[in-house]
Amino acid sequence: MAAENEMSDTIAAISTPPGAGGIGVIRMSGPQAFAVLQQIFKPHDPACSFRSHQLYYGHILAPEVSGQKKIIDEVLAVYMRTPKTYTREDVVEIHGHGNFLVLQSILELLLHYPVRLADPGEFTKRAFLNGRIDLTQAEAVIDLLSARTRKGIEIAQGQLSGRLYDQVDAIRQVLMHMRAIVEVAIDFPDEDHEIINHDELTLQLEASVRAPLVVLLRNADQGKIFREGITVVIAGLPNVGKSSLLNTLLQEERALVTAIPGTTRDTIEEYVDIEGVPVRIVDTAGIRDNAEEVEELGIQRAKQQIQQADLVLFMIDLTKGIRGADHELFRSIEHKPVILVANKMDLLPQGLPDLTEFGNHALAQVLISAKKQQGIAELKQAIFKAVVGNRGQWQEDGCAPNLRHKDALTRAYAASNQALDGLQTVTTSDLLAIDLQECLAELDAIVGVTTTEDILDLIFKQFCLGK
Ligand SMILES: Nc1nc2c(ncn2[C@@H]2O[C@H](COP(=O)(O)OP(=O)(O)OP(=O)(O)O)[C@@H](O)[C@H]2O)c(=O)[nH]1
Ligand SMILES: [Mg+2]
């Protein structure tokens, strides 16, 4: 962040998204916030004396133009005195009408005073720098604002309440304690062996450092799925019922469905929440040879989408049995994670066709009727299982470390390996201290005790303005 962007500045931004809304909020934070509010806000009750954390009704007035003050908006304003505020600084919020131009006028007015426009994420950055939240909680704000499923919200809220911080901090405390013992041993080399009980330290390292690190690392992989979601592509020959499945998953008539093969030309994508995972679901053109020009373009797109998919739902039409073209298409996608979806079970003649050949290569096979909405819950479970693995592995109340955390956790785990080796081969206390310190430093960086300005900038850049 540029040098002129000092913490002592008073900053302001529109905190609600652009577009029309019932109300729109402008937020100001810093030492001048209250003084500036008093200059531009005329309370309805002129005798009112501002009390902290209370809303006041009144008007925002522009400076006099030809002897008259112009009303910019009718608002509610609140002044929140430090330190019980979002940033721990004095904070003012002005709740105006949710018209972007009105809010822009209020913001421009503020900028005539000793107030500057906030950088993206700067309010939350101040909350972090002023010690109200740690870095994982600041990152949870980003996750909370961008979460697309209730599950994603739940995970972000857990992290915001300090769940990840607590788990990482518990490991840090153990490491600090262990390091202190080793440091003493360094100071008294003659009594080294009495001070360091190798068995006890090994036990502590295993149970209170390495085991919780492994749990966090495992959750990181699954956290990524809940945070970022996955892409699932529905592929199959024309007319097998791909668009019908898309519509059923969305519970709306999103894609055209007809009895004519080759109905879908372009790819169609939407988001659905599957057991808490945000899934980008893509319906594609049925793949066949000798398609005419427009359809052929759609088929090329379908193939591209299949290549980029995290999971492919390969659909067949049970009423048609298994056709040679099904085999051909399946061979082109079997290198991807695939679920075999056998559709139109409502029309199923006696007996199932033999699906074993596909089944052996697919992660699962599910019988459905896209039209009659049968087997859909099973399909969703199969998708969830294919991407998240067995439910048992995901701790429901667990944390979901992000990629930055995961990198640091991986390095912390490697350092703990070194420390363990050291303890087992009875290394020198100096080397052991270095390994423990390395492990600790990685965890410090996760919670933000020691994080470089570059990394902070990278994190807070992900925010939008006003957060
Ligand atoms: N009985 C029955 N009919 C279905 C089912 N699913 C789809 N259909 C019918 O099959 C026909 C094709 O369905 P679509 O969903 O358009 O198939 P598609 O795979 O998207 O076809 P293309 O876009 O041409 O590749 C329509 O007449 C649907 O009503 C089902 O589960 N049962
Ligand atoms: Mg279709």
Image (cartoon, helix red, strand yellow):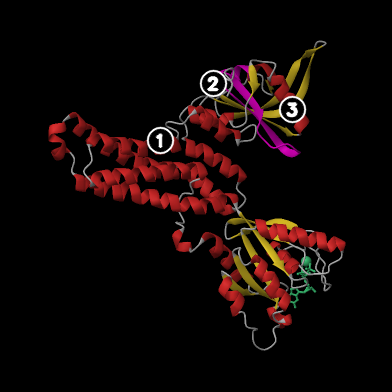
Of pointers 3 and 1, the one earlier in the residue sequence? 3
Give the residue type at disc 1: Asp
Give the residue type at disc 2: Met
**Direction from residue 49 to residue 102 in the image, left or right:** right
Q: Residues within 10 Å of mark 1 (few under 14, many from 20)?
A: some
Between disc 2 and disc 1, the foreground one is 1
Query: For mark 1, what is the residue?
Result: 444
What is the spatial separation of the Cα atoms under label 2 and label 1, in whole angstroms?
23 Å
Q: Is mark 1 within 8 Å of ligand 2?
A: no
Circle 3: element type? helix
Q: Quadrant of residue 50?
A: top right
Instruction: Tell me if residue 298 comes above or below residue 45 in the rendering.
Output: below
Circle 1: element type? helix
What is the spatial separation of the Cα atoms under label 3 and label 2, in whole angstroms?
24 Å
The part of the chain drawn in magenta is 8-36
- x%, y% of residue 257? 80, 68
Q: Residues within 10 Å of mark 3 (few under 14, many from 20)?
A: some
Query: For mark 3, what is the residue?
Result: 104
Q: Is residue 222 visible?
A: yes
Query: For mark 2, what is the residue?
Result: 7
Q: Which mark is residue 353?
A: none
Q: Are marks 3 and 2 in contact (CB under 8 Å)?
A: no
Which quadrant does the C terminus fall into?
top right
- x%, y% of residue 58? 69, 25
Query: Which residue is nearer to you in this view: 124 or 389?
Result: 389
Instruction: Tell me if residue 342 comes above or below residue 153 in the rendering.
Output: below
- x%, y% of residue 53? 55, 29
Q: Is mark 3 within 8 Å of ligand 2?
A: no
Residue under the point 61% across and 75% down: 358
